[in-house]
Image: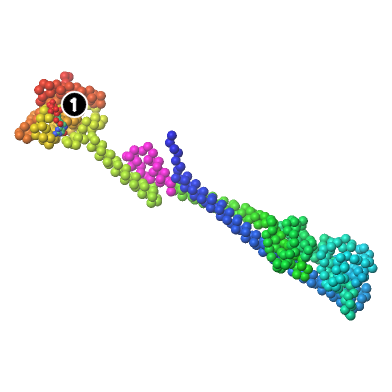
Amino acid sequence: MPIMKVRLRTLILFLSAGSMLLTTCLIIFCIFWYQREEIRDYIAFSNEAYAKKIASTTDQYLASAQKQLEWSADLISNTFEKDDVKKQFLHISGQSDYFNSVFYINKESQVEVTTNQAGNMEGRYINTLNVKNNIINKIPLISSPFVSVVGNLVVMISQPVFSSQGNYQGFIGGTIYLTTDSILSRIIGQHFYGANTKVTILDSSDSVIFNDYDSHVLSIRKNFSSLCDSGVSGSMDLSSFTIGFACVDRSKWIVLISTPKQTATNMLYASVKKSLPLIFFILFTMIFVVFFISVKISQPLEKLAKITEGADGKSLLKKLPRVRTWFYEANQLTSAVYYRLMDMNQRAEKFREESATDPLTGILNRRGFFRALVNQSKSKTNSLILMDLDHFKKINDSYGHETGDRVLMNFSSLIKNSFKKNALIARFGGEEFVALLPGTDINAACAMAMKLQGEMYKLKFSDNENVTFSAGIVNLKISEDDVMQALVEADRLLYEAKESGRNKILRQEC
Ligand SMILES: Nc1nc2c(ncn2[C@@H]2O[C@H](COP(=O)(O)OP(=O)(O)OP(=O)(O)O)[C@@H](O)[C@H]2O)c(=O)[nH]1
């Protein structure tokens, strides 16, 4: 069973298209890989910058808020007029919008003035940890988040109040709501940076001050606040998040900006998706161009292969110049095949001729005789003469083979000259010759043979010796079977001629 071979065109196409496809995939993969890292770096950088911005804004807000309380503390230490103080507090909490409520608690932990109407607080004693801290420490403080006596989650900024003699009187506190509307929640809650990016603010004990969503970040690491010890800002990869952080100097709060790592991958997927039509367009254009080129490259070789299928040397030689070659290798190959074929044909022709010719006499041999029969015109009357030299062995033995050869050559020349040009003359082997005479009847053939006998008699060799020949003559129609039959008959007659004394010509009875 013949093995199917792959075609050159298919090979080139698959090789080129395959390598292009592979290269494209590798390029997309490399771009994807390195770009993702770059985008993650960029997200980390942006998150840090954004955390710094929020931390700085918050710090400025706290500084301003403390300044407000400091100014009110001065007022109280100079003249404590309850109405004036309350007005002042209302101004701070209402107009300047720094605090949700402002209050003054004296050193006995009693609320003297408050802007908060809820809970009827004025005159009441408050013994919370925050209040105690303030009274004991007597310094400006920013508290951790806590639930106020009226039930709000707040942080408190406080400022100690001293008399003009320097005696501690109590402290002014300003509360900022964390879960309901406040200036702090507005500063840190309204951000415009990426849908997947979230803001979380923790105090120095990792309590949540602000968290703009139910953050997974808080569950993957404890002790964020310790980051403030190593630097004011930075970024890090934490589990599946890229986190930028910055510290609020004044309060030691930490601002965390977190983005899921998947965001970078999603961004890349989106951009690859967008560019896919262009990539495929370029790819298919290239494949089309490669296909076109592969057809052009393979065409001459395909044609060359096709015309060699079942073609003989001669028809191949005719078809070969029609193969149009435009590149060096194909051209060389076609030329090489062409010249090789031509050479082979010439050699084959020469060999054919040689195989049909008797090398000594130059006339046809037995093979050549039968091959030439095919081209003979078919006449009704033809004759065949089979001739054999008499006692030729003696000539060889007496005068040597060279003389024998010369006799053979002379005899063949005489035969050639004695018959018509269309006669088919051959040496059948040894000293036996045949002459087929187309369009010659047996009488004419006999006359020619006898004339040849006379000529032969005249031909002398060596010591004026001469050679005779015997012959059998038959008539025949030209076809291979007839010739074979005629040869058998002629051979019989020749044998008879030899037997009856040689130098005789016997003819078939007609
Ligand atoms: N010189 C020479 N001798 C040849 C060649 N071919 C055959 N012979 C010789 O021809 C001789 C033929 O001998 P025979 O077959 O006995 O025939 P003959 O001697 O002619 O005898 P008859 O045919 O019976 O008359 C042999 O001695 C062959 O060696 C050749 O090409 N050159």
Secondary structure mostly seen in the magenta stretch: helix
Above or below — where is 269 with respect to 488?
Answer: below
Residue 66, given in percent of the width and then of the height, sits at: 82, 72
Which image quadrant shows ligand 1? Answer: top left
Q: Quadrant of residue 411?
A: top left
Above or below — where is 14 with respect to 121?
Answer: above
Q: Residue at x 11, y 21 (%)?
A: 500
Q: Is residue 178 visible?
A: yes
Q: Quadrant of residue 490?
A: top left
Residue 32, given in percent of the width and then of the height, sits at: 60, 55
Q: Is residue 299 magenta?
A: yes
Q: Is residue 440 visible?
A: no
Q: Residue furthest front?
A: 136
Tell which of 163 and 6 is nearer to you: 163
**For mark 1, what is the residue?**
384
Quarter in which the C terminus is drawn = top left
**In the image, which residues are magenta?**
297-323
Q: Residue furthest top?
A: 509
Q: Residue at x 79, y 61 (%)?
A: 208
